Amino acid sequence: MREGTRTYAWSAAPGWMVSALLLLVLLSLLGGCVSKKEPAGDGVTTIVFKHGKIAGDPALLRRLIETFEARNPDIRVKDETLPASTDEQHQFYVINLEGKSRDFDVLSMDVIWVPEFAKTGWLRDLSHLLPEGERDEFFPGPMQAVTYRGALYAVPWYIDAGLLYYRKDLLDKYGLKPPQTWQELVKTARYVTEKEPGLYGFIWQGKQYEGLVCNVLEYFWSNGGDVLKNGKVVINSPENVEALRFMTDLIGRYGVTPRLVVTAIEEPTRHIFGSGRALFMRNWPYAWNIFQREDSPVRGKVGVSRLPSFPGKPSASTLGGWQLGVNRYSRNPEAAERFVRFLTSAEAQKTLALTIGYKPTRRSLYRDPDLIAQQPFIASLHDVFMTARPRPVTPYYMLMTQVMQSEFSAALSGTKSPEDALKSAQEQIEQMLGAE
Ligand code: GLC
């Protein structure tokens, strides 16, 4: 009935009234459209920046993004966080880029992924963002990692290398020095933990994931071993067997490493050390800034040095770090490139180093007086980063690491002997590379 009444009201209205009403409806619709379109009409482009979870306060990165937005009023940046683990982030990108996703414009990539992503055609060529003369300013390791067939597919954002953190206060208390060799580390850890009940000796990252490979390679290299040499697979060598056995002994025979490391990634070990429960820790440089916070139980008590090595061999750190690239399918590549340029600038890298503790990929910052005043050891890190060893730079790295992760993990958890694990890794990697 009501419908009928309404129909009647319409048909009974004079013609001018109907026209006026229609005009009003049209105008309001148009108005709606205009106001909705306004931001775009203003030329504001929104880009999405994907990155891994920040250890520490996420507001620190947000503040830097706001600086960019203030200077680029035509761009808004939505930053979206992925899990902290590199393996999970890799999986996210493979699934989404395989599906040609346009849901993100800028992506932060682990140093090991760029050749793979570039080969697959998922990244925009960014060679024009870094003029030749500026490239020398960056550490060579990450520059090599972002170069594929002569072109740059990302810009190095921050750099990582494995470091030894130690409790300076406790070593001083017992008149001891930071260890130069792995054997010295064992001796020192046993000595101090006997006197300090409840203290772990040495913690590191032993879960089956990428970080485990980073840890194991540091023992291989610091014993003269390697994974590939002149294109040949050399993972099953006496040096590597000895190094892997030493790692299992840290947990078993020497008892200086608690068994919990076989399930630990970076953050749990950082928490244990940061709460004052370990003498030594292997970790990336980011942990330092967190230890120096006002409320940190270890503030002012932590020293950092190069990792130890086997006697007579040089110390070796795995090269890590993150690079910024632009999604090939991005709808806003110019805005995305402007943001990459800003976030990798010396100014932004310095801010990130002072706040979050991410270490710059631009070498000149290692002489920056503000950075040296806040982190006195930063100048010595320059050499560590210059000599840090890259994991094999190949588009097939992710296949190789799957094998290494499971074989190394089997050796650490005791389900395989180091000999068997490395023999099996050798066979699988040879087969894999032979098939390519
Ligand atoms: C850090 C490094 C990265 C490495 C990862 C392993 O994020 O920067 O290169 O792959 O740790 O957990």
Image (cartoon, grey):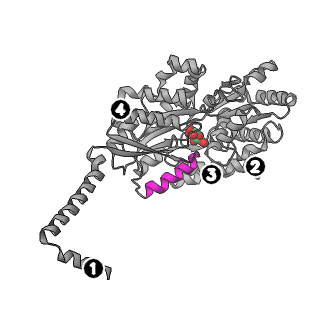
Residue that badge 3 annotates: 403
Q: Secondary structure at mark 4?
A: helix
Q: Position of residue 233 (x, y in %)?
A: 59, 45
**Residue in the image at 37% along x and 49% along y:** 328
Q: Is 341 on the left or on the right of 313, as rendered?
A: left
**Could you tell me how far apart the alpha carbons at marks 2 and 1 are, in whole angstroms?**
81 Å
Q: Is residue 1 above or below residue 169?
A: below
Q: Secondary structure at mark 2?
A: helix
**Could you tell me how far apart the alpha carbons at marks 3 and 2 are, in whole angstroms?**
16 Å
Examine the image and state in which quarter residue 358 appears. top right
Label 3 environment density (alpha carbons within 10 Å; few <14, some 14–19, many ≥20): some
Instruction: Identify the mark at residue 413; answer none if there is no mark.
Output: 2
What secondary structure is the stretch in magenta mostly built from? helix
Residue that badge 4 annotates: 71
Q: Which amino acid is tagged 4? A: Arg
The quarter in which the N terminus is drawn is bottom left
Comparing marks 1 and 4, which lies closer to the viewer?
1
The quarter of the rendering in which ligand 1 is drawn is top right
- Decide if residue 228 is in sight here: no
Q: How many marks?
A: 4
Q: Is 131 on the left or on the right of 425, as rendered?
A: left
Mark 2 lies within 8 Å of ligand 1 (Cβ measured): no
Give, as a single range, the part of the protein colored magenta. Answer: 82-98
**Residue in the image at 49% along x and 28% along y:** 351
Q: Which amino acid is tagged 3? A: Val
**Could you tell me how far apart the alpha carbons at marks 3 and 4 are, in whole angstroms?**
46 Å
**Could you tell me how far apart the alpha carbons at marks 2 and 4 are, in whole angstroms?**
52 Å
Residue that badge 1 annotates: 5
Does label 2 or label 4 sit earlier along the sequence? 4
Q: Which amino acid is tagged 1? A: Thr
